[in-house]
């Protein structure tokens, strides 16, 4: 059998998703997530204009060969657009192979290494009172791990913190459309002051430990906003609050920056959500500068590449912490869950539940129970895109915000 058709679906049930559909000559359909937040159409074009026709007539079972063909073939390597496109093809082919085998994908990856996948939720609030409510709501639902983000006095809206009070959970949306809901023309802008942040956050962690005790796993995302020396000071100062991890404390592209942080602190470090290749981790892993690998299956070349990356990390005792915000579609999330269940060096999985409209468009078979997810027993990835339902939600351009210091200088985020 061969691949007969490869088409790209773009839908926006509250936020944008790009999904690749591969159909085999005997009618088996596989799905792959190709969503790159704020640059969705670039990946859609890469797939539709440059990859789809090459797939036609290929043997759908030759996943490794297809991966190498798409990675080495075009000469231009890596980068989020290319690697998201390759990821979508890879996921769709694994979906097809597992459907043909009549097994959930995790079985083909070696079978379950655990009963469920521990997840962490996103708690945030403009101030500590709001953050405390949000954490309490997660604890009530059975979550054993929570990422905590909060506003900083003197600063306005900052990334990762829900601004309004839509409910107890204070959900936030990482990308913004225009105020009237139409396509955004340019990103919104936020203001940032690292000094204010560094003096505010340790007290927040102290309050959380006081209110919630020592059992709860607390995670925090620095979102690339600190310099190496600031990150070193911060990581050292928050050691008494026993974080599960401090994520993206410095800008990701400088792997050696984490040497300085490591020299000064034992706070566990996680990095990698903007990485797209195993080479982005070469120094970090071989020098044991991190504790958790944060790549998304969707942005790192798919299941084939993630399995290799995580096996490489395992040799150095480094664990997984796969990226799972709402800009990863349910297809990408399912791919993560199958890997999480199968690999030995699983650490934790990020879980930001999708909204109801998204879950009408993508039918999922994963289940949540008291802080743990399971990918389910449906053959394949266990997610189907309802193209009819998807067609009701037209693509609407949305952008992640840009970050500036209080004097107007463009800053990392
Ligand atoms: C996280 C993140 C996300 C990203 C987002 C960008 O840890 O989940 O930092 O919120 O910023 O995925 O598109
Ligand atoms: Mg992050």
Image (spheres, rainbow, N blue to C red):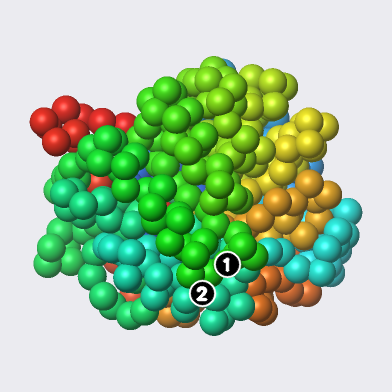
Residue on which the image places disc 1: 213
- Residue 263 located left or right of residue 113: left
> What is the x, y in percent for residue 376?
73, 74
Q: Residue furthest right?
A: 110
Q: Nearer the viewer, residue 110 or 86?
A: 110
Q: CA distance from mark 1 to mark 2?
A: 15 Å
Give the answer, above or below, for where 201 lies relative to 330: above
Name which residue lies at 33% across and 80% down. 167
Q: Give the secondary structure at mark 2.
A: helix
Q: Is residue 2 left or right of residue 108?
A: left
Q: Residue under circle 2?
A: 138
User: What's the residue at 49%, 43% (across, down)?
Assistant: 238
10 Å neighbourhood of mark 2: few (<14), some, or many (≥20)? many
Q: In the structure shown, which secondary structural element does the residue marked by tag 1 occupy?
A: loop
User: Residue at point 54% right, 51% down?
Assistant: 241
Residue 222 or 293: which is nearer the viewer? 222
Q: Where is residue 350 shown, x and y percent of the image? A: 56, 58
Asked whether the residues under the numbered discs 1 and 2 touch, taking CB atoms below 8 Å apart as contact, a structural biologist would say no
Q: Nearer the viewer, residue 212 or 90?
A: 212
Q: Position of residue 194 (x, y in %)?
A: 29, 36
- Of the 4 image quadrants, the one containing the C terminus is top left
On screen, 78 above or below 45? above
Looking at the image, tell me whether mark 1 or mark 2 is earlier in sequence order.
Answer: 2
Quadrant of the frame with the N terminus: bottom right
Determine the image quadrant of residue 280: top right
Is residue 74 visible from the viewing direction of this image?
no
């Amino acid at each position: 059998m061969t691949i007969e058709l490869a088409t790209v679906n773009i839908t926006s049930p509250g936020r944008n998703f790009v999904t690749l559909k591969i159909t085999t000559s005997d009618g088996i359909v596989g799905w792959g997530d190709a969503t790159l937040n704020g640059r969705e159409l670039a990946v859609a074009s890469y797939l539709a204009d440059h990859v789809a026709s090459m797939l036609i007539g290929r043997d759908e079972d030759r996943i490794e060969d297809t991966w190498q063909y798409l990675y080495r073939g075009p000469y231009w390597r890596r980068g989020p657009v290319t690697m998201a496109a390759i990821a979508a093809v890879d996921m769709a082919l694994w979906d097809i192979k597992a459907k043909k085998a009549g097994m959930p994908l995790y079985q083909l990856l070696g079978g379950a290494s655990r009963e469920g996948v521990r997840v962490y939720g996103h708690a945030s609030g403009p101030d500590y009172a709001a953050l405390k409510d949000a954490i309490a709501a997660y604890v009530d639902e059975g979550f054993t791990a929570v990422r905590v983000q909060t506003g900083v006095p003197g600063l306005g809206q900052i990334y990762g913190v829900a601004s309004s009070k839509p409910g107890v959970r204070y959900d936030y949306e990482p990308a913004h459309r225009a105020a009237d809901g139409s396509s955004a023309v340019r990103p919104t802008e936020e203001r940032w002051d690292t000094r204010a942040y560094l003096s505010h956050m340790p007290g927040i962690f102290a309050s959380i430990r006081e209110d919630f005790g020592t059992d709860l796993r607390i995670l925090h995302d620095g979102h690339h906003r600190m310099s190496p020396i600031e990150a070193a000071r911060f990581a050292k100062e928050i050691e008494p609050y026993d974080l599960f991890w401090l994520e993206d404390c410095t800008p990701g592209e400088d792997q050696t920056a984490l040497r300085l942080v490591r020299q000064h602190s034992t706070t566990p470090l996680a990095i990698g959500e903007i990485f797209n290749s195993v080479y982005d981790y070469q120094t970090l892993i071989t020098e044991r500068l991190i504790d958790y690998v944060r790549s998304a299956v969707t942005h790192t070349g798919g299941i084939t590449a993630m399995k290799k990356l995580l096996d490489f990390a395992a040799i150095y005792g480094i664990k997984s912490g796969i990226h799972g915000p709402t800009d990863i579609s349910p297809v990408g999330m399912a791919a993560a869950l199958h890997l999480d269940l199968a690999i030995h060096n699983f650490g934790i999985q990020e879980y930001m539940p999708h909204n109801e409209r998204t879950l009408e468009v993508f039918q999922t078979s994963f289940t949540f129970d008291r802080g743990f997810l399971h990918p389910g027993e449906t053959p394949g990835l266990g997610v189907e895109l309802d193209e009819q339902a998807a067609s009701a939600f037209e693509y609407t351009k949305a952008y992640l915000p840009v970050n500036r210091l209080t004097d107007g200088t463009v800053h990392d985020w």
